[in-house]
């Protein structure tokens, strides 16, 4: 459980003493009772260059400098600053954005959804204004996701012949478009650094809840995709057909084996799922997938070599996405909604 509080004078003096004694950041955080990110920010806030008697220089932490900077930073932005006296809220916001990669809206949405209580309430425009003005020590616009992304209109395009012989999205039941029924998925891959990364990511998004499943592919091939689906079928067992009713994919070569993706590994005479193919160059037909991939990129930047990533790394990214508060769901998380849908199947 994370702990959010504004450091007191006594906390700062204790921090200074522990640093001088050579204690690590995590140990100091545990002793003071705060998250380690608070310690890192506090040290940055109070660091100054000290000149020794032999004229050598070294960086030291001063509790007085740290306190003065924090108070001045809040005061000099205006006398009516609502967050100025609510240090606990400021600390919470800084940690969620700087440490966890939340957007301002997601932070405020989570506070509301979880019923967290602070001395002050601020709106999303006000929070963006504070960030623009430099109110927070460790948050700038550079740390924020892309702001105000406009939703693109689905343009009419000329349908081109598909390369795959699987079922076209044109034959997908129209009621799937409403997202009212659970169990319809979109599937895509995210590739690493071109020419260097052999590994890629297989990303599945449940259309109703936006719950995400992410798997590491050790080769960017249709064989690896089918193997992962086989593993998924084995994990879910008899419930697989209830949870995975349809999967919509693009025309990438890794999805060329429509028969292998649809055929049950447990019983080759059975069909485990129906796979639909989008039209070429129509990524908007997998809109959920495309939006989710932007969240993936916030944790795994474009151009990164996936060969350096482990299964545990990918699991942490998946957990972060599914635990992220969603405005479209009243700031509930996809993970919460997914679990509710599973409970209905029991």
Image (cartoon, rainbow, N blue to C red):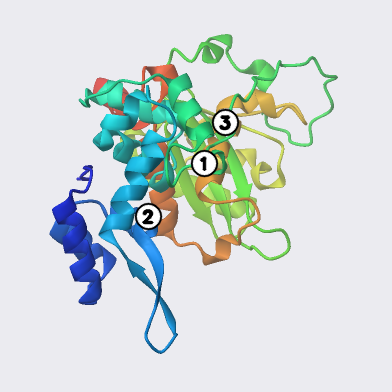
**Residues marked 3 and 1 touching at CB (< 8 Å):** no
Q: Say if 277 sits above or below 53 in the image.
A: above
Alpha carbon of mark 2 to alpha carbon of mark 1: how far?
A: 15 Å
Please give the name of the residue rendered at 26% of the width and 31% of the height, measured from the top-left corner. 86
**Label 2, residues with CA under 10 Å away: few <14, some 14-19, many ≥20:** many
SS at badge 3: helix
Q: Which residue is mark 2?
A: 45
SS at badge 1: loop
Instruction: Report the front residue among 257 and 292.
Output: 292
Q: Which residue is mark 3?
A: 291
Q: Is residue 269 in view?
A: yes
Q: Is residue 37 in view?
A: no
Tell me where residue 249 appears, x and y as whole percent. 62, 33
Q: Nearer the viewer, mark 3 or mark 1?
A: 1
The quarter in which the N terminus is drawn is top left
Q: Say if 50 sits above or below 147 in the image.
A: below
Q: Which residue is mark 1?
A: 140
Q: Mark 1 or mark 2, which is nearer the start of the sequence? A: 2
């Amino acid at each position: 459980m994370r702990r959010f509080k504004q450091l007191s004078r006594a906390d700062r003096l204790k921090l200074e003493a522990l640093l001088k004694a050579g204690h690590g950041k995590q140990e100091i955080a545990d002793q003071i009772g705060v998250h380690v990110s608070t310690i890192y920010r506090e040290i940055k806030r109070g660091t100054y260059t000290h000149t020794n008697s032999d004229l050598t220089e070294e960086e030291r932490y001063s509790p007085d400098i740290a306190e003065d900077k924090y108070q001045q930073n809040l005061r000099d932005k205006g006398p009516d600053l609502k967050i100025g006296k609510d240090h606990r809220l400021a600390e919470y916001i800084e940690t969620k954005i700087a440490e966890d990669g939340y957007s301002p809206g997601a932070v405020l949405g989570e506070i509301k959804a979880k019923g967290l209580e602070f001395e002050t309430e601020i709106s999303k425009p006000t929070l963006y204004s504070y960030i623009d003005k430099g109110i927070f020590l460790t948050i700038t616009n550079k740390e924020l996701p892309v702001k105000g992304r406009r939703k693109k209109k689905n343009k009419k395009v000329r349908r081109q012949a598909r390369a795959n012989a699987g079922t076209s999205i044109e034959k997908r039941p129209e009621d799937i478009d409403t997202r009212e029924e659970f169990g319809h998925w979109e599937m895509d891959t995210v590739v690493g650094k071109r020419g260097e990364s052999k590994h890629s990511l297989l990303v599945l998004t449940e259309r109703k809840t936006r719950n995400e499943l992410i798997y590491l592919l050790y080769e960017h091939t249709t064989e690896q995709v089918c193997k992962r689906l086989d593993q998924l079928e084995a994990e879910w067992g008899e419930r697989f057909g209830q949870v995975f009713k349809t999967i919509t994919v693009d025309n990438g070569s890794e999805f060329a084996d429509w028969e292998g993706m649809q055929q049950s590994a447990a019983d080759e005479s059975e069909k485990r799922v129906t796979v639909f193919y989008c039209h070429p160059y129509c990524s908007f037909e997998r809109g959920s997938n495309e939006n989710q991939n932007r969240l993936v990129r916030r944790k795994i930047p474009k151009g990164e070599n996936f060969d350096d990533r482990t299964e545990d790394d990918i699991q942490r990214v998946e957990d972060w996405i599914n635990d992220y508060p969603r405005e479209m769901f009243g700031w509930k998380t996809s993970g919460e909604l997914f679990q509710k849908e599973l409970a209905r199947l029991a």
